[in-house]
Amino acid sequence: MVDYNSLFIKHTDCNIHTITLIRDSILASSNKLQDKLNLLDEMEHLFSQMLDNSQSLTQFLNEVDTHFTHSREEIEDFSSWLKKIKDSASNIDRLSSQANILSINSAIEAGHIGREGAGFAVLAQEMKKLSLEIQKQASSIASINNNLGARFIPVKETTEKNQQQVQQVKTLVEEGHQNLTSLSEQAGELKHIFTFLSMQQFFNTVKLDHVLWKEAIYIHLLNNDDEHCVNQHTECRLGKWYYQGDGKKFAKTDAFRRLEEPHKLVHECGRLALKANIEDNQEAVAHYIEKMEQASVDVIKYVDVLLNSDNY
């Protein structure tokens, strides 16, 4: 006669082994995705530093550009003053020339007057000397002014050229900053996708853990094992995630709060069913198994709600 219990246990063990392989494969995939997430975290930090540096460089170049603008304004002001000095020197030279002509005419007129005009002739001669000296000084001023103007032309040109180059560099930095911002945003989107995939793989692993745990309960019932052969709700993968791990990221969600009770109930009812079986209380076994399965449906439901949330 076929021992159906032994046959059932054998094939169930085989199915459990297959599901375990699938679960482990999904878990390994989740771990690999987590490694990629760690790399993306490093990239995100690097992008943040690069954006801060480019922002600081742009600010510095703006200050340099402003400095060059002020320098150009000062050079323009100085050039304006040089022009005024040149105009003033030209006026002095013109007036001294007129004074020189006037002194010559005065000397001629004094000669016509005779001895009475001798004093006036001496005065005219002094005026001529003074006007010639003023012309000489005006010429020196004009020469110095021209030298200064000639020296400031290349300074002005260099300043303008340097400012243009600074503005070109600033444009390149600003474009680079925009490209970095775009790249950082794309990396952020990629990180979000990887995070979702990693959490999806993790939650799928948790759901398979859940199925395997229930299947183990049925095997233990057939083997008449007691409740100490299975773990409690704080000791499984989901329990460790919930109470000790990254579950805190979901702590403010309604699904996270609702998940605790049915998950706890699945473990408690499974263990109580094993205990009732040892005590040969089959009615209690059926009661606890039914409660375990009902609670199991809620566990899967709330895990799926968490997966579709935006808290990862």
Image: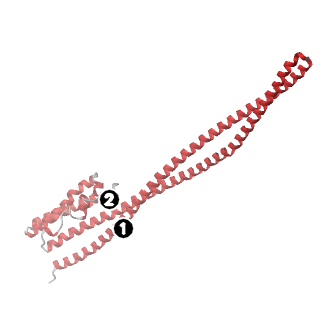
Residue 70 visible (yes or no): yes
Counting from the top left corner in percent of width and height, residue 270 is at 16, 65
Residue 185 visible (yes or no): no
What label does residue 32 carry, if any?
1
Rate crowding at label 1 as few (under 14), some (14 to 19) or many (20 or more) other CA atoms within 10 Å: few
Quarter of the rendering occupied by the N terminus: bottom left
Residue at screen point 27% across, 72% down:
20
In this view, the residue in front, 310 or 85, is: 85
Decide if residue 68 is on the left or right side of residue 142. left
In this view, the residue in front, 149 or 137, is: 137
Decide if residue 7 is on the left or right side of residue 124. left
Query: Along the polypeptide, which appears first: circle 2 or circle 1?
Result: 1
Rate crowding at label 2 as few (under 14), some (14 to 19) or many (20 or more) other CA atoms within 10 Å: some
Q: Which amino acid does label 1 sit on?
A: Lys
The quadrant in which residue 184 appears is bottom left
- Indicate the colouring scheme: secondary structure
The quadrant in which residue 132 appears is top right
Quarter of the rendering occupied by the C terminus: bottom left
In this view, the residue in front, 210 or 287, is: 210
Decide if residue 98 is on the left or right side of residue 150. right
In this view, the residue in front, 154 or 279, is: 154
Residue at screen point 22% across, 64% down:
236
Counting from the top left corner in percent of width and height, residue 245 is at 27, 59
Residue at screen point 73% across, 39% down:
146
* Residue named by callout 2: 307
